[in-house]
């Protein structure tokens, strides 16, 4: 059986979010506890990232399609910038000469 994962980055909140709050956030996305195999913090300097490994790849795909990307959420009474992403896809940032930094 193949397992698949997705990551949720919560930026660099202070104080750091409790793992129970992270668990409630994920179940609030519509992911039932029975589909989760492992919840593991990813050790990074500064940022708080948690990796979720699910039993089925289809469940990971559904979460990424519905909730993937960056959005703000209220967690523990604070506005937190949350990034839900596939850990297997490497992010690259490109600077384009003479293009305004605030342009979308």
Image (cartoon, rainbow, N blue to C red):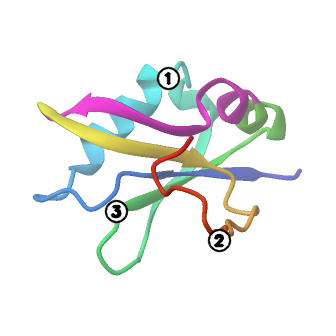
**Residue 94 falls left or right of residue 20:** right
Q: Position of residue 62 (x, y in %)?
A: 73, 27
**Residue 73 falls left or right of residue 103:** left
Q: Which mark is residue 97?
A: 2
Q: Is residue 3 magenta?
A: no
Relative to 47, residue 74 above or below? above
Q: Residue furthest right?
A: 1
**Residue 96 falls left or right of residue 30:** right
The 10 Å Cα crowd at callout 1, few under 14, some 14 to 19, many 20 or more, is few
Q: Position of residue 3 (x, y in %)?
A: 78, 52
Residue name at image x 34 percent, y 62 percent:
48
Q: Residue furthest bottom?
A: 45
Secondary structure at numbered mark 3: loop
Question: Gap between marks 2 and 1, in whole Å?
Answer: 38 Å
| Disc 1: which residue | 29
Disc on the earlier residue, 3 or 2: 3
Residue name at image x 53 percent, y 18 percent:
30
Which stretch appears magenta?
A: 62-76
Secondary structure at numbered mark 2: loop
Disc on the earlier residue, 2 or 1: 1
| Disc 3: which residue | 48
The 10 Å Cα crowd at callout 2, few under 14, some 14 to 19, many 20 or more, is few
Secondary structure at numbered mark 1: loop
Question: Gap between marks 3 and 2, in whole Å?
Answer: 32 Å
Q: Position of residue 80 (x, y in %)?
A: 27, 41
Q: Nearer the viewer, residue 31 or 71?
A: 71
Q: Nearer the viewer, residue 32 or 94?
A: 94
């Amino acid at each position: 059986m193949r397992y698949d994962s997705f990551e949720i980055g919560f930026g660099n909140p202070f104080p750091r979010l409790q793992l129970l709050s992270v668990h409630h956030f994920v179940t609030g996305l519509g992911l039932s506890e029975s589909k989760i195999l492992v919840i593991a913090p990813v050790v990074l300097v500064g940022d708080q990232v948690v990796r979720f490994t699910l039993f089925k790849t289809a469940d990971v795909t559904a979460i990424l399609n519905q909730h993937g990307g960056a959005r703000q959420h209220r967690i523990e009474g604070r506005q937190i910038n949350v990034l839900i992403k596939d850990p297997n896809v490497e992010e690259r940032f490109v600077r384009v000469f003479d293009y305004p930094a605030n342009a979308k």
